Structure formats: structure tokens, C-alpha cells
Image (cartoon, rainbow, N blue to C red):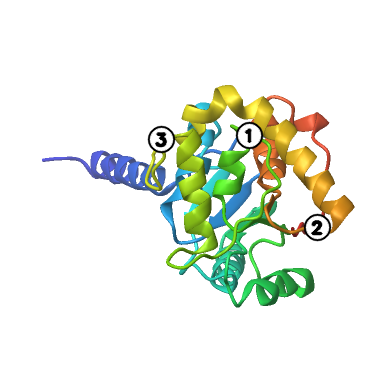
């Protein structure tokens, strides 16, 4: 007959195993970032591939889709997640300007938002946008251009941009799972072109094409190896 001590030891082992299975993944020393993107696959695939390429801890860098493609849906979902998730340092909301009617509403909400007293995290919020869409950042890996992308007869501005991107990268698809890896060799050129475009837009007060995705990419690429030298981000950034 099994002793009482043996039963207690067995139960203790079971409890420890259950505790281990419930335990959250161990975080690395660098900051914890939540990235919330529009409902399309492109942005999430890109940032997940970036994290995989640079071996960033998935307990530190959380990438998820917002509930819906509207900017306000992305912002609302980001706020909801941080209210119930502990120890998030930064929240990065990623969405397009395109033809979204809630673009200004979303950016205004980020500026004015104050965390609730019982929120599990009280992070700094940031907005990363592209006009007309995320593919501006991808295009800048190949060329520098200030040509605006506009709606035509049967195509949206985003559709026209994607068509232009495919002239330089014929294999591009929105469900591409290795976006960052495929473009990594051109990343230095993309940074250079994105900064040049930002300066141009500021000089001539232009917003099409535009993107500040390079700021977020630079943050993530340098996060693991040079976290002490990273410059602090603004409370919010809007193109």
C-alpha cells in the first residue's frame, strides 16, 4: 500500500508540473513591446519575420492583428490588450492612412489617452503610419520616389502602389511569410530613402507618399544588441 508521504510527493510533483505549464515564457532584459497592426497579413508577417530573423524573444515582442482594419479598431484593441497584460513598456500601433475615415480619430485618441488606474500596464503609446499604405516602406527598399499614389478608375491608391511595387519586386504578395528576410539586404537603402522622404515631406509639406515605419524597424533591429544606446521614441509619432 502506497504511503501517505509517497502520495503527497506525487501530488506535489503534479502541482509543480502544472505550475510550469502555466508559467509565462521568460522575458529577456530588454523592453517589452506590443505591436498591433491592421487586419491584413502583410504588417504582422513582416514584424514576426523581423523578430525571427534577429532572434528577438517572443515574450518581449508581441505582434498581433487589431480587430478590424480601421485605425480606431487598431488603437482600441491595443488599449484593451495593455489594460489586461502586465509589464508592457511600449505599444506600437501600425496602420495606413489610405482612405480610412477614422485615421484622425485614432491618432487623437492616442494623444489624449490616459491609462486606467487598474490597468496592468501603463506603457508609452506610439503611432506608425504609411500613406497610402505599408507598401511605401517596402518600395523604399528598391527606389527613392516622391511620386504620390492616388485613386484611379478601378483601383485604390493602395492598389496602384502595390502594382508599382511589383514592377520592382515581381514576387511580392500580401501573404508573404518572409518579408523581412527577403528584403534584409536592401534594408540600409530603405533606411536612407525613408529618411530622405521624411525630410522632403517636411520641406514641401507633403503627406503622399509617406511612412515612419523605418523608425519602428530601427528600434527593433537594434533592440537586442544595442538596447542601451537606443534613442527614446516620442510619445507618439504620426505622418
Residue 143: where, in percent of width, then height?
63, 34
Residue 82: where, in percent of width, then height?
60, 63
Residue 88: where, in percent of width, then height?
65, 53
Image quadrant occupied by the N terminus: top left
Left or right placement of residue 15 versus residue 124 in this view: left
Q: Nearer the viewer, mark 1 or mark 2?
A: 1
Residue 235: give its label. 2
Q: Residue at x 41, y 35 (%)?
A: 170
Which is more N-terminal, label 3 or label 1?
Answer: 1
Badge 2: residue crowd in 10 Å (few <14, some 14–19, many ≥20):
few
Q: Is residue 77 above or below residue 168?
A: below
Q: Secondary structure at mark 2?
A: loop
- Residue placed furthest toward the right: 203
Residue 137 sits in which quadrant? top right
Residue 144: where, in percent of width, then height?
68, 37
Which is more N-terminal, label 2 or label 1?
Answer: 1
Residue 5 sits in which quadrant? top left
Image quadrant occupied by the C terminus: bottom right
CA–CA distance between discs 2 and 3? 37 Å
Residue nearer the viewer, 49 or 4: 49
Q: Residue at x 60, y 33 (%)?
A: 141
Which is more N-terminal, label 3 or label 2?
Answer: 3
Q: Residue at x 84, y 59 (%)?
A: 205
The reply to whether residue 228 is visible in this rendering is yes
Residue nearer the viewer, 146 or 54: 146
* Figure disc tally: 3
Residue 83: give its label. none
Left or right placement of residue 110 versus residue 57 in this view: right
Please give the residue where the numbered disc 1 appears in the rendered image.
143
Please give the residue where the numbered disc 3 appears in the rendered image.
170
Q: Secondary structure at mark 1?
A: loop
Amino acid at each position: 500500500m502506497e504511503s501517505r508521504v509517497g502520495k503527497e510527493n506525487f501530488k506535489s510533483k503534479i502541482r509543480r508540473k502544472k505550475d510550469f505549464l502555466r508559467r509565462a515564457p521568460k522575458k529577456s532584459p530588454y523592453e517589452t513591446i506590443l505591436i498591433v497592426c491592421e487586419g491584413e497579413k502583410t504588417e504582422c508577417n513582416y514584424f514576426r519575420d523581423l523578430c525571427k530573423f534577429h532572434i528577438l524573444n517572443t515574450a518581449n515582442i508581441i505582434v498581433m492583428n487589431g480587430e478590424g482594419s480601421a485605425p480606431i479598431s487598431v488603437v482600441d484593441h491595443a488599449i484593451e490588450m495593455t489594460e489586461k497584460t502586465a509589464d508592457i513598456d511600449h505599444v506600437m500601433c501600425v496602420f495606413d492612412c489610405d482612405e480610412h475615415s477614422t485615421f484622425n480619430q485614432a491618432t487623437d485618441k492616442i494623444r489624449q489617452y490616459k491609462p486606467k488606474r487598474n490597468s496592468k500596464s501603463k506603457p508609452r503609446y506610439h503611432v506608425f503610419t504609411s500613406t497610402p499604405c505599408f507598401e511605401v516602406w517596402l518600395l523604399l527598399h528598391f527606389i527613392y520616389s516622391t511620386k504620390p499614389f492616388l485613386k484611379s478608375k478601378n483601383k485604390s491608391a493602395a492598389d496602384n502602389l502595390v502594382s508599382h511595387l511589383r514592377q520592382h519586386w515581381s514576387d511580392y504578395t500580401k501573404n508573404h511569410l518572409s518579408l523581412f528576410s527577403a528584403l534584409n539586404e536592401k534594408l540600409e537603402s530603405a533606411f536612407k530613402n525613408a529618411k530622405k522622404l521624411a525630410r522632403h515631406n517636411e520641406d514641401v509639406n507633403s503627406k503622399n507618399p509617406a511612412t515612419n515605419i523605418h523608425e519602428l524597424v530601427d528600434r527593433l533591429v537594434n533592440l537586442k544588441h544595442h538596447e542601451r544606446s537606443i534613442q527614446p521614441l516620442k510619445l507618439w509619432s504620426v505622418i
